[in-house]
Amino acid sequence: MRKFLTLLLVIAMLLSMVGSAAVAEGEYADVINIADNDQGASYDLHKDTSVNVRNMLRGTVFEQLVTLKANGEIGEELCESYTVNADSTEYTFVLRQGVKFHNGKEMTSADVCASLNRWLDCFSTAKKMVGDARFEAADAYTVTIKMEKSAILLLDMLAGAAQAAVIYPEESIAAVNPDTGFIPVEAFIGTGPYMFTEWAVDQYIRLDRFDDYAPYGDPDAAIDGLWGYKHAYTKTLMYWIVKDAATRFNGLMSGEYDFVIKLTDDYLDAVSYNDEYTCYSQQTGQITLVWNKRNTDKYLRLAFQAVANADDLNTVNYGTLYDLDPCFMEDGQPSWYTDAGKEYFCQNNVELAKELLAQSDWDVSKPLRILVSKGGHAEDMLEVLKQEVAPLGITIELTITDRSTLTQLRGEDTKYEAFFTTFSSVAVPSLRSYLGATWAGWSEDAKLQDMMSAMTGAATREEAYQIWCDIQEYCYSDYCPILMMGHFHQAAACSAKLTGYNVFLTTNFWNAQLAK
């Protein structure tokens, strides 16, 4: 099955290349209906780390100064060029002129500086890397940032951060709600080919084509990763919030939905061998239990790592759509791939776990509280974990809630010992949120933070990679900020009438067309 789906992924990518040529040859629908499996807490990309939010809006509604190409290289998006000095302490970006926001205003350096300085304030990893430096306007179309030490990974962070470095008009930044810290929905104004039109909570998100969009790149070339010419052939993209996998599948079969996200093993066979549908699967991110380091000690965390059986855990949640790969990055990122610490990955060793737990201060008479969002089979996965730690005398108490509530609760260190989540691919290891000192779970360990600073301040990428290997080894052998359980594959399926979408990290519908 895995080989077959990989072949279909290639087919899907080829279809994305030929979609533009077909536009004059047939009639196409005005609306593409996409069944998403969940919604975000805020849709404010500077703060919201939700995969669903980023996949829906980055490059579609909001754009960045730079973005990622398929090989991991950096491509100019809202800037036409950039320069970096020899020691990576000074960056200069020359903006594209004539780029309009969805409210009709032209983008200038004032908007870029307001957006990126807020992004730094929201994203602790980038803020720590640049220190006190901030983005400044040299003129209406030139932005600079000057740092005291090397920031060799800044472009990668601007292009691929989970807290995306998107550009809003400065008025949207000024409109941040002082109580929530989020940009309000009415200020979701970007430069992308689609406008954020409506959010009916728990029902749908509607995106409508922006007729004054200023494209970049070659209109005759295929999208390269997240970079390239966006035609926005389709008038409206409807993202329906459909949390139940069976409902998504049945909606695809009935024609209610044209594309469904997170197709499970239960339904793969029904579409894989049917010419009316196209499906694909790719390694998309990692499966993790994030520890609250303020409420747990390393011996407790290492005991869980020692006792966990990753196959048993993942099978109930992902079927066959997972890999037992210890790397904190994905297999499609060879420049950052390492198996350092692999001997500590989910060892399925009860006796070792008991030895480690004996050194812990954890009181086994009280339940260990884990937060998990409802939907899918994550709850089932944690029920298996309950059984695996039972021989250690540990009981687990699950708090099952919606994603919005979980996002709120994970910021309160008295509410839990761990929370379950997944993390999608990021451009560089420094973008792994759980390694940050101020992100939920609080990896405040001085040694880890010194190593992270050394990596982001390295003089060369080769030096940064060696430090990254040491960081992963330290996380597995000693600090254990997360219980790493492997990598998930995201399977998706669509009507064979849908062409022109491109697949990179997620599925992007900028150039998609649905034949009537």
Image (tube, rainbow, N blue to C red):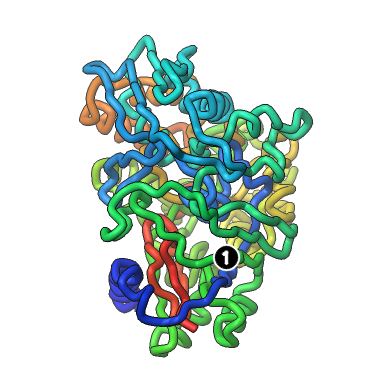
Q: Which sits in the foreground, 491 or 391? A: 491
Q: What residue lies at 51% left-to-right and 81% top-to-bottom?
A: 267
Task: Provide residue 439's location: percent of width, then percent of height.
Answer: 58, 33
Which of the 4 quarters of the picture holds residue 130? top left
The residue beneath circle 1 is 236
In this rendering, position of residue 401 left or right of residue 419: right
Q: What residue lies at 65% left-to-right and 69% top-to-bottom?
A: 242
Q: What residue lies at 60% left-to-right and 83% top-to-bottom?
A: 250
Task: Provide residue 468's location: percent of width, then percent of height.
Answer: 32, 33
Q: Which sits in the foreground, 239 or 353? A: 239
Q: Quadrant of the N terminus?
A: bottom left
Above or below — where is 57 with respect to 245?
above
In this rendering, position of residue 214 left or right of residue 33: left
Mark 1 neighbour class, 10 Å CA radius: few under 14, some 14 to 19, many 20 or more: many
* The residue positioned farthest toward the right in the image shown: 179
Task: Provide residue 489's location: percent of width, then percent of height.
Answer: 43, 63
Above or below — where is 35 with respect to 487?
below
Which of the 4 quarters of the picture holds residue 19? bottom left
Residue 349 in view, yes or no: no
Above or below — where is 347 with respect to 467?
below
Looking at the image, how many numbered discs can be counted on the residues?
Answer: 1
Above or below — where is 82 with respect to 20?
above
Q: What residue lies at 58% left-to-right and 52% top-to-bottom?
A: 195
Task: Provide residue 134's location: percent of width, then percent of height.
Answer: 48, 17
Residue 74 in view, yes or no: yes
Q: Which sits in the foreground, 313 or 168? A: 168
In this rendering, position of residue 353 left or right of residue 476: right
Helix, strand or loop at mark 1: strand
In this rendering, position of residue 426 left or right of residue 162: left
User: Which amino acid, by three-letter code, is at mark 1?
Assistant: Thr
